[in-house]
Image: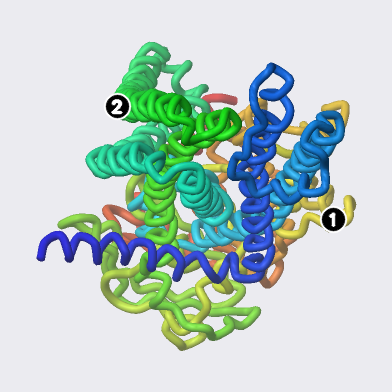
Amino acid sequence: MKQKKKKEKESGGFIAFFKNSYPYFKKQIPVIWFAMIMGLFRMVILLVTPQAVLLLVDRVINPLLGGEVGDGASIFSFLLDDVAADDYVKIFLILGGAILVSAVLFFIFFYLKWNLSHYYSLKCEKKLRADALEKVNGASAPLLARYSSGDLILITTKDPANIRDMYIAVPQWMLDSLFYVVVSAVFLFRIDWTLIFLPLFGGAFSALVVALYKKRVGKYFDSVWTSSSALSTTVQESVYGARTVASFAREGERRKIFARDNEKLLKTYYSGMKMFADRTLIAGVARTLVTVGELILAVFLGIQAKITPGEFTATLGYVGTLMWQMNNLFFSFNQAQRNLVSANRFFGFMHERDETAEKYGTDIPTEKPSFSFCGVGVKSGENYALKNIDLEIPYGKKLGVMGRTGSGKTLLCKLLQGFAEADEGEIYIDGKPVHDYSRALLAANCSYAMQNVFLFSNTIAANVSLADPTAPKERIERAGALAEVDEFARRFPDGYDTTIGEKGFGLSGGQKQRISIARALFKNANVIVLDDVTSALDLDTEHSIFRNLKAECGEKTLVLVTHRATALKDCDEIIFLDRGEIVERGSFAELMAQKGNFAEIYERQLSEVAYEE
């Protein structure tokens, strides 16, 4: 009963694989089948070539060496029916021509099979990668938190290739090997029925070896994926955090972490190499014993004149290749295991429910939305990251947000756009619950400059024009001028066409922040959210940018998060967060009159500016 359940589980794996992957490959199935047929033709040529060699030995080589003309069992015998037995030149030309034609056809079939199968299936792999990346881009934060960056990289790059391999490589190998084994066994049987027993025994033994190693092979491929993912994550962190690592002189520690993960992957590979080496040794010994045994049997049959010299030659050719094909057949099962592991990960991620994203509907938000927070709370473990948030943001309002580090300012910005979820209370947009709307359109409705600036390895212009890469240069430079990007971009020889490194390597923190602001302004959405994006700027540059913002925003909604109280003077309302709650709110004048946290910070910052001057 246990074995039955195990088999059902395994067959379910294959069934699930084809059920999940077939939609990607269904249009290419005819081409894949045609390529497999070309592969079979290639195997036919491999199988029939010894038949021509058999006749060549029996009808040409052996007689010329003083032996008798043989009458071996060859499928090409009909080619010589009308040829004199002693016309060795003509026989040689006919058989040599057959071998030459076979070789030409072999390469033609190989070329067609290789190019057709790979050319068309690569399109399917491309679609798999594109869908995986789309899933990553549209996934909620809770879903992405279940995977490391290394996991996601492997899922979007390596796993699609392994899934494609399951269509164009593994089935072809299995079919080719099985076809060769069966047909060569038939040819051996035609020569002498006793010649098939040793290869069958060798094949059964190879199958047993593969079955015994099957579970270990599956665990090995799983371990390789896990170790590769961990190492990939470590490398990314070391590369992207290079400046931070250097500034804290932690290069040695990062090297140790890399060495640990690298060593783990190396040990995983070593264990696999040893396992495969052991299995190959056992299979190789069996293959050698079968080949030697078959050689002895063929010699014995030749001595007894039961097979001709040509049949002896063909037997050796078939046996050696037959055993190799048997091993290849069982090796294909291991490749299938590897590919199934990849497919399970890939489609497991693709089909994993995104409960957060599923909460949202399809309504389209208006171009001029108004937001209402009613008793909103967000938990962080047993505590609250935000609590009892009641807030009205009608369209066109200029809202300033202040608070100490960790008070929930960034979380509040994310709630506005559907990037975070409230555990308590409700958020309304134009009087309707936020979950009635399309989550993607909510995000598209806002221009968001994040606290942690991310820049792509591209030109300054491309980073600014992320919302519309086809935009004219004038529009890009206008946004750059508003965010004071001009001040440094124009100093580069290539100006806005200057390529910057990944994550803005080569730029200062303030320069990256200005590009981030320019990117938000370029998008030209009616709701602009700036989340502490001027912390690395000097006061003069910050004042200049806020002056430009005031003129540019006009009637648009502006949510401005900052640590500098002086930047919020012109806001319609300012809220001060402390431990996730709004502890002060009002206009600039009202908060100054309250003489609370905001007024204290403002006075302190003014005195610091006066001291610096």
User: In this rendering, would 172 be left or right of 252?
Assistant: right
User: Disc 1 and disc 2: Cα gap in Å?
Assistant: 70 Å
Q: Quick one: label 1, few (<14), some, or many (20+) residues within 10 Å? A: few
In the displayed structure, 175 sits above or below 92; it is below
Where disc 1 sits, the SS reads helix
Q: Earlier in the sequence, mark 1 or mark 2?
A: 2
Please state which of the two labelled residues, at mark 1 or mark 2, is closer to the viewer: 2
Residue type (three-letter) at the residue carrying disc 2: Ile
Residue of label 1? 475
At 52% across and 78% down in the image, what residue appears? 438
Residue at the extreme bottom of the image, as rendered = 431
Q: Quick one: label 2, few (<14), some, or many (20+) residues within 10 Å? A: some
> Quadrant location of the C terminus?
top right
The answer to whether any part of residue 576 appears in the image is no
Residue at the extreme left of the image, as rendered = 1
User: In this rendering, would 77 be left or right of 571?
Assistant: right
At 88% across and 50% down in the image, what residue appears? 473
Q: In the rendering, at what x and y percent does residue 503 appear?
A: 60, 36
Where disc 2 sits, the SS reads helix
At 39% across and 24% down in the image, what residue appears? 296
Of residues 585 and 382, the one drawn nearer to the viewer in this rendering: 382
Residue of label 2? 282
Where, by quadrant of the figure, is residue 498 drawn?
top right
- Which numbered dot is residue 216? none
Residue type (three-letter) at the residue carrying disc 1: Arg
The answer to whether any part of residue 613 appears in the image is yes
Of residues 129 and 55, the one drawn nearer to the viewer in this rendering: 55
Q: In the rendering, at what x and y percent does residue 139 appear?
A: 46, 62
